Image (cartoon, grey):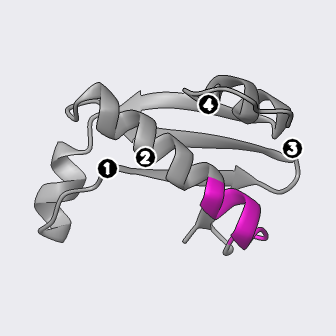
Amino acid sequence: YRLHSIPVDLIKICKHNKLTIEMYDFAAVEHSVGHKISGLIKYDKQKRRGIVYINDDYPEILQRFTIAQEIGHFIMHIPADEDGVIV
């Protein structure tokens, strides 16, 4: 990736891996599962593209951390399950 400076350009890494980032309101999901969700990634095997969903209620620094964490999950855990969710 030729990342030689801080902060790391997460957008550039996402674009390179065909990932888009979307802000998402996880409130209803959090209520039903009983805990907070900072983000998740969903991958479409046919299109070979993914979407990183980030909790829009979290502070920017935690959103950046979550994007980086989801990129890590993407790189380490492809292929996704049948629903395309990478865990």
In this view of the protein, which residue sits in the foreground, 60 or 83? 60
Q: Going from the N terminus, do you reach mark 1 or mark 2 first?
A: 1
Q: Give the range drawn in magenta.
A: 72-80
Q: Is residue 82 above or below residue 30?
A: below
The residue identified by callout 4 is 8
* Mark 4 neighbour density, 10 Å: few (under 14) some (14–19) many (20 or more): few
In this view, the mark in front (1 or 3)? 1
Q: Tell me if label 1 and label 2 are in contact, CB under 8 Å.
A: yes
Kind of residue at badge 2: Thr
In this view of the protein, which residue sits in the foreground, 32 or 12? 12
The spot of residue 26 in percent (x, y) is 26, 44
Quadrant the C terminus occupies: bottom right
The residue identified by callout 2 is 66
Give the residue drawn at x 11%, y 58%. Answer: 31
Q: Distance between the residues labelled 2 and 4?
A: 13 Å
* Left or right: 50 as drawn, with respect to 53: right
* Mark 1 neighbour density, 10 Å: few (under 14) some (14–19) many (20 or more): many
Q: Is residue 26 above or below residue 23?
A: below
Q: Going from the N terminus, do you reach mark 3 or mark 4 first?
A: 4
Dominant secondary structure, magenta: helix
Q: Distance between the residues labelled 1 and 4?
A: 20 Å
